[in-house]
């Protein structure tokens, strides 16, 4: 009987290991295949109910063929005036592209700028070129570059789309490699162990492979959407979360192994005693991400279920694969730093014993000073502008489309190549055109004819509607252009029986900002409510959850304050993407609560035996090292997003990385323990811990199984 029981104890870990090896071998390659079902078509991620989205749908009827415009701009190499002969040659160069692969729709002649020093022409390209887009743009560049004395550049949506695709190229291998290398290096330095970091890395890779396989299948069937941003965040999120959960479980396994010496019993006890905190933490992050489904922005809604799938896979790997490997390896997993008897108690954590002692001596002074520090940093938060970033700040390195757009903006109206698109009733076309021209900030407004080009002849009428293209005076991504869109809509909506709608690139930016602001107002309270309910259920208290939510919210505001200073004065950003604050909030608040859950679940466990004050001291001492390590690892993991040369991801990476470190080193280590000690038993109301004296015997924890 004993032999059978012994075999069963080894059988379960062995079976789990075989299952995960099969998952890793079969599904692992999907971590590199997710790009096959990803799309970087920004039009697919517009607000669903916005006016600009309705215009995007309506304007398709006026295009002879679906197209994405590439704007060719020529300027004289010596800065002089463009001659008529050069203009004719540029027109012939563009005309030579007719019928070539990827070119869709009518080609415009080369038009001279008012200052006479530049030309521009629009080359419509097929919207479904995908990986062929760069080569088609090269053909356009080659054809247009043959005009003597002129330099040709390509701007417009097609060029921007190509540069975005280039920024995300190799994201699977590069981002994954940088993130895993950072995690491995930190684990090796912190734990001075050879096998444990490798086991944790393998656990993260298996979780990522499983998550990518599930997301790949859903995206291939149109259930979820994936773009380069979602793809990158998924990789970082899974690696960071799996590592965090693995570190918590491994630390508990080390304690249990030092106490009882039996590897399988230690693995079971570690899972039993850490599963509650891990699953509660995972539920917090997953539900916070799912709250993004309430957003009207498609890319926000896309991140919600994709991120939640990643978190679920991280939990599965951490609570099944890792315990199975630890049960089979035992002390060998920690070689050469094998567990010692004092690892079973809080006596072995010298640094964190000193930190806990400082807090215990003067808790009020500690929480008052740390709160003041966070409030000072939070005072700079209003300086973070989230009205979007101009085109020349989207990329953090020089790219061809930005250089071309700058040349275009110097010689033509700022909105050239990206006009405001107006759809209105045909009977009101003259009034709509006149009202648009009379609007401050509009350079010109022309109806679109049957050829698909603005100006020249009668307008094309489709289902009783016409299209008017209004070129704006200011750059299409500027705040001034967005204000012009607002004024244009106000003027045109007031025209009787015109039923005018205003869309186009600038209107899409404007609508995205309005939608992002609405999303923050809706989703932030929902996320805070979700977190509060989970904490109440886990800690069986009301005051402690409120304190934890308040501290992570203050940490978020302090992080925004620091980010506002860094982005403007060190990195030179004029603002952030409209979605950055919401993404930063969801990740930072949900992940920040993770560490407080790890701490306070252990504090509650210790308080049941040693009282509230002793429980805080012992809980902080026991978890300080592992939670700090987890925070450093998560910060380094998110910092890996900086390898993708996009301002959006760099800003998200900084906010989350800095915020996690601030939360780990200040909020969780100093502010929260000091507040709980100062509040005393009242902080645990209405549980038995809130009553004076010893805890109720029924709540005392049972000793670990031998």
Image: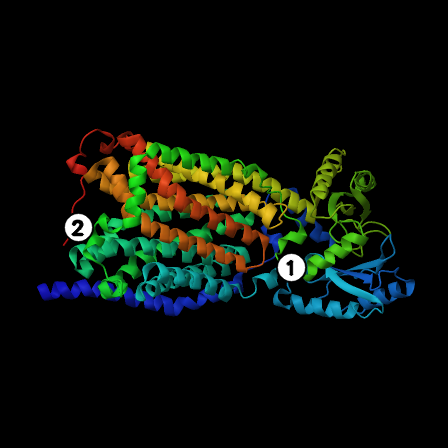
On screen, residue 426 above or below 329: above
Residue 349 is left or right of residue 52, and the answer is left
Q: Secondary structure at mark 2?
A: loop
Instruction: Look at the image and tell me in which quarter the C terminus lies.
Output: bottom left
Pointer 1 or 2: first along the chain: 1
Between 698 and 503, the residue placed more toward the observer is 698
Q: Position of residue 38 (x, y in %)?
A: 54, 60
Between 492 and 93, the residue placed more toward the observer is 93
Residue 64 seen from this side:
no
Query: In this figure, which colouring scheme has been used for the structure?
Result: rainbow
On screen, residue 43 above or below 336: above
> What is the quadrant of residue 120 in the picture?
bottom right
Q: Position of residue 243 (x, y in %)?
A: 37, 57
Q: CA distance from mark 1 to mark 2?
A: 58 Å
Residue 138 is left or right of residue 11, and the answer is right
> What is the quadrant of residue 212 in the picture?
bottom left
Q: Position of residue 319 (x, y in %)?
A: 30, 56
Q: Residue furthest right?
A: 84
Between 127 and 116, the residue placed more toward the observer is 116
Residue 329 seen from this side:
yes
Q: Residue at x 33, y 36 (%)?
A: 674
> What is the quadrant of residue 25 in the picture?
bottom left
Q: Residue at x 61, y 64 (%)?
A: 166
Query: Callout 2 environment at 10 Å: few (<14), some (14 to 19), or many (20+)?
Result: some
Residue 354 is left or right of residue 501, and the answer is left
Q: Position of residue 475 (x, y in %)?
A: 73, 48
Per the rendering, the mark at residue 141 is none
Provide the residue designation for mark 1. 161
Per the rendering, the mark at residue 704 is 2
């Amino acid at each position: 009987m004993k032999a059978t029981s012994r075999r069963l104890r080894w059988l379960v870990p062995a079976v789990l290991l075989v299952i995960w090896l099969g998952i890793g071998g079969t599904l692992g390659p999907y971590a590199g295949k997710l790009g096959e079902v990803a799309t970087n078509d920004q039009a697919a991620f517009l607000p669903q109910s916005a006016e600009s989205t309705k215009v995007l749908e309506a304007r398709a009827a006026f295009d002879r063929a679906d197209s994405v415009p590439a704007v060719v701009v020529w300027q004289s190499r010596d800065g002089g005036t463009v001659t008529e002969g050069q203009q004719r040659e540029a027109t012939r160069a563009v005309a030579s592209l007719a019928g070539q692969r990827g070119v869709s729709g009518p080609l415009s002649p080369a038009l001279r700028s008012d200052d006479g020093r530049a030309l521009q022409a629009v080359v419509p390209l097929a919207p479904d070129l995908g990986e062929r887009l760069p080569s088609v743009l090269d053909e356009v560049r080659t054809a247009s570059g043959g005009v003597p004395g002129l330099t040709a550049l390509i701007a417009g949506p097609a060029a921007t789309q190509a540069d975005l695709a280039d920024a995300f190229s190799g994201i699977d291998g590069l981002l994954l490699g940088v993130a895993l290398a950072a995690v491995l290096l930190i684990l090796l330095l912190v734990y001075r162990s050879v096998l444990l970091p490798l086991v944790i890395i393998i656990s993260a890779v298996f979780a990522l492979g499983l998550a990518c396989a599930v997301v790949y299948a859903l995206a291939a069937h149109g259930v979820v959407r994936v773009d380069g941003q979602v793809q990158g965040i998924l990789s970082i999120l899974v690696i960071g979360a799996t590592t965090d959960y693995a570190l918590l479980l491994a630390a508990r396994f080390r304690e249990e192994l030092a106490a009882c010496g039996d590897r399988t019993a230690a693995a079971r006890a570690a899972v039993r005693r850490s599963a509650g905190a891990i699953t509660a933490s995972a539920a917090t992050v997953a539900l916070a991400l799912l709250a993004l489904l309430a957003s009207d922005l498609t890319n926000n809604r896309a991140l919600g279920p994709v991120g939640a799938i990643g978190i679920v896979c991280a939990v599965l790997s951490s609570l099944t694969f890792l315990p199975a490997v630890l049960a089979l390896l035992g002390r060998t997993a920690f070689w050469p730093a094998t567990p010692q008897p004092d690892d079973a108690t809080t006596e072995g954590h010298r640094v964190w014993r000193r930190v806990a002692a400082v807090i215990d001596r003067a808790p009020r002074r500690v929480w008052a000073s740390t709160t003041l520090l966070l409030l000072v940093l939070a005072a700079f938060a209003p300086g973070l502008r989230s009205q979007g970033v101009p085109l020349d700040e989207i990329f953090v390195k020089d790219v061809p489309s930005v250089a071309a757009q700058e040349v275009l903006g110097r010689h033509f109206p700022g909105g050239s190549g990206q006009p405001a698109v107006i759809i209105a009733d045909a009977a009101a076309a003259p009034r709509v055109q006149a009202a648009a021209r009379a609007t401050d900030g509009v350079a010109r407004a022309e109806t679109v004819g049957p050829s698909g080009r603005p100006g020249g002849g009668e307008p094309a009428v489709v289902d009783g509607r016409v299209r008017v293209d209004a070129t704006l005076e200011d750059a299409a991504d500027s705040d001034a252009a967005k204000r012009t869109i607002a004024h244009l809509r106000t003027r045109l909506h007031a025209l009787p029986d015109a039923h005018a709608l205003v869309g186009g690139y600038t209107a899409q930016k404007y609508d995205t900002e309005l939608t992002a602001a609405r999303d923050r107002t809706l989703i932030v309270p929902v996320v805070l409510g979700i977190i509060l309910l989970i904490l109440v259920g886990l800690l069986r208290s009301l005051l402690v959850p409120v304190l934890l939510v308040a501290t992570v919210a203050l940490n978020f505001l302090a992080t925004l304050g620091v980010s506002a200073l860094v982005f403007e004065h060190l990195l030179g950003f004029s603002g952030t993407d409209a979605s950055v604050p919401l993404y930063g909030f969801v990740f930072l608040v949900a992940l920040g609560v993770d560490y407080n859950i790890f701490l306070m679940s252990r504090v509650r466990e210790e308080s049941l035996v040693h009282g509230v004050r002793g429980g805080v001291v012992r809980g902080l001492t026991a978890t300080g090292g592992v939670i700090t390590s987890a925070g450093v690892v998560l910060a380094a993991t998110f910092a890996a997003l900086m390898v993708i040369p996009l301002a959006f991801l760099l800003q998200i990476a900084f906010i989350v990385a800095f915020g996690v470190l601030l939360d780990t080193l200040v909020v969780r280590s100093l502010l929260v323990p000091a507040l709980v000690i100062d509040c005393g038993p009242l902080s645990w109301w209405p549980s038995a811990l809130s009553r004076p004296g010893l805890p109720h015997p029924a709540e005392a924890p049972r000793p670990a199984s031998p």
